[in-house]
Amino acid sequence: MKDEDIVRLLAALAQAHRLRAFRALVVAGPEGLTPGVLAEQLGLPAATLSFHLKEMLHAGLIGCTRDGRRLIYRADFARMNALLAFLTDNCCAGQPCGLTPAGDLSCDLPCDCPAGACADPAP
């Protein structure tokens, strides 16, 4: 994925309504959601939601299909996973990392952060 693509994806998520809408579509899974259901879940007016869905469509974060008269929006899981892979590509200086039960990234490398800057500083 090119840097321009990454910036476009991150920019599309850098707004509270879009982030909430994207997360709702991720939760909905492959079945997706109609704009009406999504607007109701998020408490957004249809026009506002339409604007945000358009922005995410242009970025490639979501897709849209027609089912009769209904539009179904779905998260593009392949793009989402490509973005996550890019963001974590050099995690922990290339050493294997794991997820703690709380979901925080951790690794066995010593922490070079200034005192108090790390959420989980190494001993």
Image: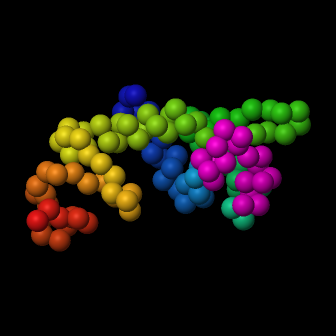
Where does residue 120 sit, x and y in percent of width and height? 23, 65
x and y, in percent, of residue 37 in the image = 78, 54
User: Measured from the top left, where is residue 54 in percent x and y?
Assistant: 66, 42
x%, y% of residue 99?
34, 52
Magenta stretch contains residue 39: yes
Does 105 appear in magenta? no
Q: How is the image coloured?
A: rainbow
Q: Residue at x 19, y 40 (%)?
A: 95
Q: Residue at x 34, y 42 (%)?
A: 87
Quadrant location of the C terminus in the rendered image: bottom left
Q: Which of 66 and 78 is in front in this view?
A: 78
The answer to whether residue 22 is above or below residue 119 is: above
Considering the image in quadrants, where does the N terminus appear? Answer: top left
Q: Nearer the viewer, residue 69 or 104?
A: 104
Residue 112 picture quarter:
bottom left
Q: Kindly identify the residue that appears in the image at 64 percent across and 43 percent down.
A: 29
Horizontal placement of 2 versus 91: left or right?
A: right
Which region shows up in magenta? 24-41
Q: Residue 54 vs residue 101: left or right?
A: right
Query: Which residue is outermost to the right?
Result: 69
Side of 26 where 93 appears, left or right: left
Q: Is residue 71 visible?
A: yes
Which residue appears farthest toward the front when viewing the image? 101
Residue at image position (37%, 59%) is 101
| Overall secondary structure of the magenta section | helix
Instruction: Give above or below for 4 relative to 100.
Output: above
